[in-house]
Amino acid sequence: SASPESGNAQDEAPAKEEPQKSRFQQMLDGLAADRFEYEKEVPNTSCLRLSENPLFKLTTTTLVIVNAVMLGVFTDNPQLSDLEDLSEYAFTIAFAVEIAIRMQAQLGFFWHDRMNIFE
């Protein structure tokens, strides 16, 4: 009988290429492989799913753009200072909630992403 090391190319099945994993799946794989730095902490999967949701990302990106537009409007129209204060509070709360969701979702991994540090 032929040994498995005979080098017969016909006997070997071609290796399947795995599809690109989502960030969520990579984090879960990291947990499964015990690579998570904080053994007692488990990511909040509902926050992780929310933070990776395309609608969440679109909403936060839209908020950034609307905030930039509003800053331009308020710069050109100083008579809107009361509305400016309200707008600043609203955007600050919205961005704080966004960061809190992402921090809860990613736990220790949050600080490994340079964009998170920048934000």
Image: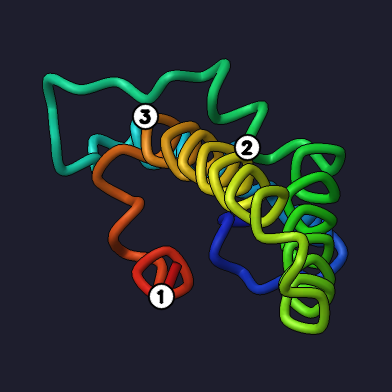
Q: Residue 97 appears at what percent x and percent y?
A: 51, 34
Q: Quadrant of residue 107?
A: top left
Q: Quadrant of residue 53?
A: top right
Question: At x 75% / y 71%, what residue is drawn?
Answer: 74
Question: At x 87% / y 64%, what residue is drawn?
Answer: 10
Side (left or right) of 88 relative to 107: right
How far apart, in angstroms, are the residues tagged by discs 1 and 2?
Answer: 17 Å
Q: Which residue is the site of mark 3?
A: 32
Side (left or right) of 71 relative to 101: right
Q: Residue 36 appears at what percent x and percent y?
A: 24, 40
Q: Which residue is the site of mark 1?
A: 118
Discs 1/2, front: 1
How far apart, in angstroms, are the residues tagged by discs 2 and 3?
Answer: 21 Å
- SS at badge 1: helix
Q: Residues within 10 Å of mark 1 (few under 14, many from 20)?
A: few
Q: Quadrant of residue 16?
A: bottom right
Discs 2/3, front: 2
Question: At x 49% / y 32%, what residue is drawn?
Answer: 101
For the residue pair 23 and 118, the one nearer the viewer reads as: 118
For the residue pair 58 and 9, the one nearer the viewer reads as: 58
- SS at badge 3: helix
Q: Which residue is the site of mark 2?
A: 51
- SS at badge 2: helix
Instruction: Check disc 2 and give the amino acid type.
Output: Ser
Question: At x 54% / y 65%, what residue is drawn?
Answer: 5
* Badge 1 or badge 2: first in the primary sequence: 2
Instruction: Check disc 3 and give the amino acid type.
Output: Ala
